[in-house]
Amino acid sequence: MKHKRIKAPKLRQCLEAAAAVIVAEEPRLNALDSAIGDGDHGITMRIGFEAVKQKLSILPESAGIGEVLKESGSAFMGATGGAIGPLLGGMLASGEKALSGRTEMGPDEFRLWLAAMETSLSRMGKAKPGDKTILDAVHASCQAASQTGSDSIGEVCAKAAEAATLAAQMTATMLSVKGRSSRLGERVLGHPDPGAVSFSLILHAFANCLKEAADEADPAL
Ligand code: ADP
Ligand code: MG
């Protein structure tokens, strides 16, 4: 059984699970960025998620969903440089406004957060779907989440994660329009966008975390 709705403590676990996956995948993310960028994407993502973990470890237990997202986003942004720092930091933090007043995250709140991530990302990065960026994965996951009529956040997240993975794979067929890789022309063909791959890893980590603990009937989560 997957989680239907979660509270802030489970959201913190999901973010920690994402941090663990990103740390483990650092070499692969660097290699992907070496093919079409400057090779630092894994390092930046690892530094950002280590900062998120550190921030979560000192955040009071009483912190709600919005605060957890805001603090995670600002920790990520504050610790990282590169294109992805403000973009992904802003995406994480976008959940605070989108979910203001909510004490739980179910499918509707998860869809709202994904939509807020897409809005924040496209406003800041000015990319469009098809430009071979992280936005391709975010956009596909938003669409999948809105098309998944389930009352379980775990199920909606799993569908969103699958869609993000497919979209990240599809970026290998695209030319790059934004960021460093846009200078490389057709040399980027055959290589997926590192940011899109990172986003799919994050959603899969969330989906796994939501799946795992669903049997531990802990009301606090
Ligand atoms: P940098 O390009 O500064 O070295 P990273 O390597 O950490 O930063 O991140 C690169 C990723 O950032 C790309 O794979 C892409 O997904 C994302 N990216 C870069 N520019 C943009 C943008 N304008 N809009 C959306 N995503 C972008
Ligand atoms: Mg880079």
Image (cartoon, grey):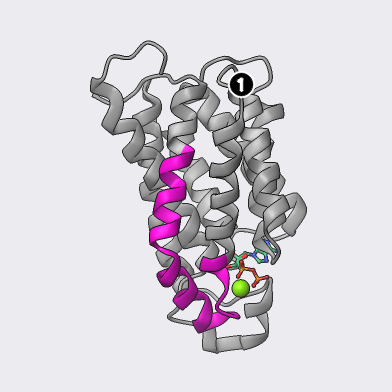
In the image, is 10 to the left or to the right of 93? Answer: left
Q: Position of residue 163 (x, y in %)?
A: 40, 49
Q: Position of residue 79 (x, y in %)?
A: 68, 55
The one of 199 and 66 positioned closer to us in this rendering: 66
Confirm whether residue 133 shows in the render. Answer: no
Where does residue 99 sit, x and y in percent of width and height? 64, 23
In the rendered image, the quadrant that contains the C terminus is top left
Residue 98 image offset from top left, x and y in percent? 67, 28
| Mark 1 secondary-structure assignment | loop
Residue on which the image places disc 1? 63
Tag 1: amino acid: Ala
Q: Residues within 10 Å of mark 1 (few under 14, many from 20)?
A: some
Q: Is 221 placed above or below 76 here?
A: above
Vertical position of residue 74 compared to residue 85: above or below? above
The answer to if 105 sits in the magenta stretch is no
In this rendering, does residue 186 appear at all?
A: yes
Compared to residue 139, the image places residue 167 above or below, namely below
Can you tell me whether the CB of the residue at mark 1 lies under 8 Å from the nearest atom of ligand 1?
A: no
What residue do we see at 56% from left, 38% from top? Answer: 114
Residue 121 to residue 144: above or below:
below
Considering the whole magenta stretch, tell me its main secondary structure: helix
Q: Work out which residue is located at the far front of the displayed protein and give it.
A: 58
Magenta-tinted stretch? 15-43
- Answer with left or right where residue 215 lies relative to residue 194: left
- Res 172 → quadrant: bottom left
* Count of residue discs: 1
Residue drawn where x is 27% and y is 32% of the image: 212
Quarter of image, ligand 2: bottom right
